[in-house]
């Protein structure tokens, strides 16, 4: 049964909020100030028709918007969109009892995302490769994506052909990175490959746009080692591994990190990943990179050995969630950088709070857990210096943030 509701705000997931007599409803793809005809489904509303539109509503860039769940906010005018993301960060800090200035969001351009994680499944009509429908398991097969770099978006048909050979009946993932040397493709959740499939997949090596293909960690071919420029160094991404999603966003994050660290030495880079900050920091100071993944640490070492003019880079394998660096270990560093997954780094933040480290930089894709960790540092005697949001995840409700602290 259809009903008409007024949208009074945007939730942190990017859905419109309607306050009704029977409680709050979340309505995707709607904007504050709009009147929307909806179908109620539990605590959510499915938009049927825009009765009156917000002046901030614009035409989306992509024909899949509204079905594909990869984007939540293509319909929101740019300035209003950036203001909303900035407010999400401010609200997260305020909810942790931290009143602070949040700088304007650093924007990124459409067509700049260099890492994509596609879902793929075999259907009666063939391979569906794309992204999940918002809040559902269904995979929306995409024929275009204005968020992705053209090098990726232009090869969707190739990815489907690879998936046709590489996956079985179960849903699989395909992680694609547009490296400087070509596309790096990793299939996760593929099927057992016979000689025929291996030979057919190997034939894709003839495509000069492809650098590497792996299936469940097994290398099918390597035309060129994938490389990603990071300042004056070259990162060596691990197949299917984490990488900052957009080069321009990474550059903004790195500039903020380097600006705060300054000439401090030595430096610890915790949750170092593939060395995004490590190699840049090592231009100025000796760096200890700590990470729980051996492959990522090996990539950091290899990249450091290939880069001229770096200060010493030391790598340490350690699960920083279960075994964070203790204050006595941290005290020898003049600066600490930490960039954990979305869950944040509560235990490591508590250890830093008990240390004497003069400068700290926290990087996070989750404002809520970042604010929690910031509160821990502040209670431990640190002063919050700067909060910089970076729109790493264009048109989504997610936002990357750098927060800097001083003793």
Image (spheres, rainbow, N blue to C red):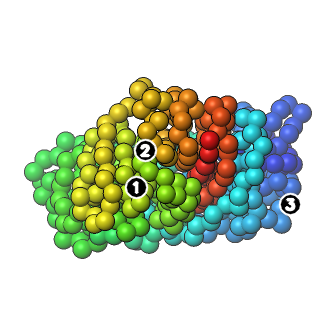
Name the residue carrying label 3.
52
Where disc 2 sits, the SS reads: strand
Q: Is residue 200 rendered to the left or right of residue 54?
A: left
**Quick one: quadrant of the C terminus?**
top right
Q: CA distance from mark 3 to mark 1?
A: 57 Å
* Circles 2, 3 touching at the beta carbon (< 8 Å): no
User: Is residue 165 at all visible to an observer of this figure?
Assistant: no
Residue 204 in the image, given as x and y percentages of width and height: 21, 65
Where disc 3 sits, the SS reads: strand
| Frontmost residue, 341 versus 69 | 341
Classify residue 59 by image quadrant. Answer: bottom right
Where disc 1 sits, the SS reads: loop
Q: Residue furthest top?
A: 322
User: Is residue 301 at all visible to an observer of this figure?
Assistant: yes
* Circles 3, 1 touching at the beta carbon (< 8 Å): no
Badge 1, how many Cα within 10 Å: few under 14, some, many 20+? many
Q: Is residue 377 rendered to the left or right of residue 115?
A: right
Q: CA distance from mark 2 to mark 3?
A: 53 Å
Name the residue carrying label 1.
285
Residue 122 in the image, given as x and y percentages of width and height: 35, 48
């Amino acid at each position: 049964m259809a009903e008409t509701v007024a949208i009074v705000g945007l939730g942190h997931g990017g859905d419109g909020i309607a306050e009704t007599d029977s409680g709050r409803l979340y309505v995707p793809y709607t904007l504050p100030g709009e009147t929307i005809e909806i179908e109620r489904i539990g605590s959510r509303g499915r938009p049927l028709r825009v009765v009156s539109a917000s002046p901030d509503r614009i035409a989306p860039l992509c024909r899949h918007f509204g079905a594909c769940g990869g984007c939540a906010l293509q319909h929101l005018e740019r300035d209003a969109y950036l203001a909303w993301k900035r407010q999400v960060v401010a609200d997260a800090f305020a909810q942790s009892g931290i009143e602070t200035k949040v700088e304007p969001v650093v924007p990124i351009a459409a067509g700049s995302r260099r890492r994509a994680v596609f879902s793929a499944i075999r259907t009666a009509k063939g391979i569906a490769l794309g992204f999940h429908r918002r809040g559902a398991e269904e995979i929306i097969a995409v024929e275009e994506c204005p968020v992705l770099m053209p090098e990726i978006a232009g090869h969707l048909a190739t990815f489907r052909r690879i998936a046709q050979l590489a996956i079985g009946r179960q849903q699989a993932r395909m992680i694609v990175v547009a490296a400087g040397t070509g596309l790096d493709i990793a299939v996760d959740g593929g099927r057992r490959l016979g000689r025929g499939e291996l030979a057919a997949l190997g034939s894709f090596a003839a495509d000069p746009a492809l650098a590497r293909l792996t299936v469940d960690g097994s290398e099918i071919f390597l035309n060129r080692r994938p490389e990603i420029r990071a300042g004056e160094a070259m990162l060596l991404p691990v197949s299917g591994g984490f990488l900052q999603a957009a080069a321009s966003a990474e550059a903004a994050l790195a500039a903020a990190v380097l600006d705060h660290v300054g000439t401090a030495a030595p430096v610890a880079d915790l949750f170092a990943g593939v060395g995004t900050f490590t190699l840049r920091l090592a231009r100025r100071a000796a760096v200890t990179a700590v990470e729980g993944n051996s492959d990522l640490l090996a990539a950091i070492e290899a990249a450091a050995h290939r880069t001229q003019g770096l200060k010493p880079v030391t790598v340490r394998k350690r699960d920083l969630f279960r075994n964070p660096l203790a204050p006595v270990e941290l005290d020898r560093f003049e600066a600490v950088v930490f960039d954990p997954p979305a869950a944040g780094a509560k235990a490591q933040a508590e250890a830093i709070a008990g240390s004497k480290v003069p400068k700290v930089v926290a990087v996070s894709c989750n404002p809520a857990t970042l604010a929690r960790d910031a509160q821990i540092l502040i209670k431990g005697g640190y002063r919050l210096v700067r909060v910089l949001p970076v729109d790493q995840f264009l048109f989504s409700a997610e936002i990357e943030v750098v927060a800097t602290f001083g003793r």
